[in-house]
Image (cartoon, grey):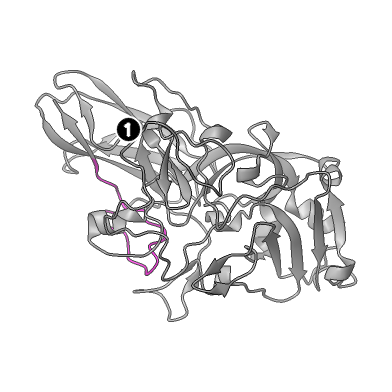
Amino acid sequence: MPGSVDPPGSTEGSTEGSTEGSTEGSTEGSIELPGIVKPLPARWFVRRDTNAEMRWDALRDADGGAVVGRHVPVERFFVRNHTSTPLIDPAAWRLRLFGSGLHGAPGPERAVEFALADLRAMPATRTDALIECAGNGRSYFHRQQGQRVPGTPWTLGSIGSAAWRGVRLAEVLRAAGLTDCAVDVLPVGLDPDYVVDGTNHGPVRRPLPIAKALDDALLAYEMNGAPLTPDHGAPVRLVVPGWVGIASIKWVGSIEVADHPLRSPWNTVFYRMFGPGHPPGGVALTTQVVKSAFELAEGARLAAGREHRLYGRSWSGTAPVLLVEVSTDDGRSWRPAELDGEPPAGDWARWSIGWRPERPGRYELRARATDRGGATQPERAALNREGYLFGAVVAHPVTVV
C-alpha cells in the first residue's frame, strides 16, 4: 500500500470470499494492471483489484532454498496505488516546502524549493525498513473470524522490506527554515487525484506529527542500492518506519509545514479505526501491529514421514521481534522457532523450524510472534469497521500426503 487508501464503503474488493479481480490460483503468465509500470509475473504476485500482492511462497524455490533475502528485490516488491503510477522527470522535479511552521511563513507561491541534486548533496542516511499496507491481512477477518469488512482482500503479502537511502526529513525541514512552532507536516504526492463515488479527494496526502517527522522519517531517492523506480515513488518518496504504509507517501512533490494540526481525508475519513472500542469519530492509524507469515503456499503438499524445514518471517511496528513460536497441531502446542540472527529494529525477523509429520492428512500451521515491547499476536483480532491492522495468529493450511 505505499501511499494508498481503502476508503469506508469502498467497492474495490471484498473479504467475503469473492475472487473477482484476483489471479491467486494461477502462477502462469503475467498480471495485467494498466496503472502499474513494471512487469508482474503471476509466479511472484497475486492481483488484488488494481494492486499486486507479493506471493510468500515465491520467496523460496521448489527445493526450499531462499530466493529472497532480508530485502525484497524491487521487481518483486508489492504495489499499491490509488490510481496509477505517474512518470516524473527527475531533472524537472522539485520538492516545495511552505507554511506557517517555517520562518517567514511562506505560502505556496513562495515555497522553498529543492531539486533532486540538492537532496543528494545533503548528508545521506540509509534505513532498512518495512512498508506495509494498513489493510495487510484484512481477508482473515472474514476467513477466520466470520466478520465481513470492506476493502482490498489482502492476505499477508502487502508488505516488503528494502534498504532505503536518502536524506532525513528533519534535515530538509531545517534547511527550509523550520521553527519551534511547527506542529504537523503534510507531504503531498504527485499521483493523479483520487476519485471515489464521484468525490474528488485530490492528491494523496496525510499529515505527520512533527515529532515523527524529526525522528526517523526519510526522504528516499534510492531503494536497494539503485534509484527509485516509478511504481515505488520515483524520484523521491517518504519512508516512515514502523507506521502504516499510507504515511510513506510516494512521489512527494510538496510538504506543508504548519504551526497547527493539519487535516486531509487520509487522516479524518480514511485510515481511522472505527467500531467497537473506538470513539465515535475514530482514531487515526499510526504504528503497525505484530504479524507472522510462512514462506509457503496455502494448501502446500508435504510428504509424510520426512523432515521438513518450515520458514517464515515476523515483524512489528513498535519493537524488534523477540520470540517466534510455531504450532503444527492446530494450536494445541507450540515450539520456539530458530531466529536467523538478531532481529533488527524496524525490519522483520527471519526464522525456521523443523517438522516431521508422520501421518497423511490436513493440518493447520500457525506462527505467533512476540516483540521486545511485550506485544504478542492474539488468537483473535479486535474488529474495526474497515478491517485494518489484523494481527491475530493466522491458520496456514497444508496437506500431508
Tell me the residue that label 1 is attached to.
296
* Helix, strand or loop under label 1: loop
Alpha-carbon neighbours of circle 1 within 10 Å: few (<14), some, or many (≥20)? many
Decide whether residue 33 is among the magenta residues: no
Q: Residue sitting at 85 percent across and 72 percent down?
A: 107
Give 306 or 375, whichever is nearer the viewer.
306
Q: Residue sitting at 29 percent across and 65 percent down?
A: 148
Q: Say above or below: 112 vs 157.
A: below
Q: Where in the figure is residue 240, as x and y percent of width and height?
A: 61, 52
- Residue 90, by quadrant, is top right
Q: Say above or below: 23 vs 386.
A: above
Q: Where in the figure is residue 349, as x and y percent of width and height?
A: 45, 36
- Note whether residue 311 is visible: yes
Q: As drawn, is 59 to the left or to the right of 297?
A: right
Give 82 or 209, whichever is nearer the viewer.
82
Q: As drawn, is 311 to the left or to the right of 331?
A: right
Decide whether residue 383 is among the magenta residues: yes
Q: Amino acid at mark 1?
A: Leu
Numbered label tally: 1
Q: As drawn, is 358 to the left or to the right of 190?
A: left
Magenta segment main secondary structure: loop
- Residue 149, by quadrant, is bottom left
Q: Where in the figure is residue 171, as x and y percent of width and height?
A: 80, 51
Q: Look at the image and give the residue range highlighted in magenta.
A: 378-396
Q: Where in the figure is residue 208, as x and y percent of width and height?
A: 64, 63
